[in-house]
Image (tube, rainbow, N blue to C red):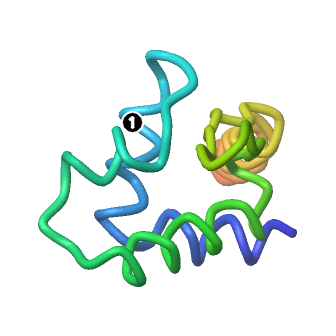
Amino acid sequence: MMNDAFKAIADPARREILHLLRGGEMTAGDLAQHFNMTKPTMSHHFAVLVNADLITRRRDGQTIWYQLNTTVLEDVIAWAMDLTTRTKDKGKI
């Protein structure tokens, strides 16, 4: 799961999608308006983020809503902080 999260956030467009979702749930159409991409490309980015469990989606009729899933992001941040803490602690005598 962690590898999928790192792969997902490696792309600037996907990081921007996550940034946009900080404000709350948005539709696929609302998100797509912020990008100059085809619908299939946007769908690919959404799929990568959903597969990494960084966002969730729900369908309401024809509309797909996306929401940020902070649980996985918190795990990634905790891992990175643990890594930097261990590195700093090794330097102490």
Residues 42 and 69: in front is 42
Amino acid at dot 1: His
Where residue 12 sits, quadrant-wise, is bottom left
Q: Position of residue 81 (x, y in %)?
A: 68, 40
Q: Is residue 34 visible?
A: yes
Residues 35 and 39: in front is 39
Q: At x 56% / y 70%, what residue is drawn?
A: 8
Does residue 26 sit above or below 18 in this rendering?
Answer: above
Q: Position of residue 17 (x, y in %)?
A: 40, 48
For the N terminus, give its image quadrant: bottom right
Q: At x 36% / y 74%, what residue is drawn?
A: 39
Does residue 36 sit above or below 67 in this rendering?
Answer: below
Q: List the single residue furthest toward the top.
A: 23
Residue carrying label 1: 19
Where residue 42 sits, quadrant-wise, is bottom left
Q: Secondary structure at mark 1?
A: helix
Q: At x 67% / y 40%, what residue is drawn?
A: 77
Q: Position of residue 14 (x, y in %)?
A: 42, 61
Local crowd size for mark 1, using a 10 Å CA cut-off: few (<14), some (14–19), many (≥20):
few
Where residue 40 sits, quadrant-wise, is bottom left
In the image, 15: left or right of 66? Answer: left
Residues 86 and 79: in front is 79
Residues 39 and 46: in front is 39
For the C terminus, give its image quadrant: top right
Q: At x 73% / y 46%, what residue is drawn?
A: 57
In the image, 35: left or right of 76? Answer: left
Q: Is residue 93 visible?
A: no
Does residue 9 sit above or below 61 in this rendering?
Answer: below
In the image, 20: left or right of 68? Answer: left
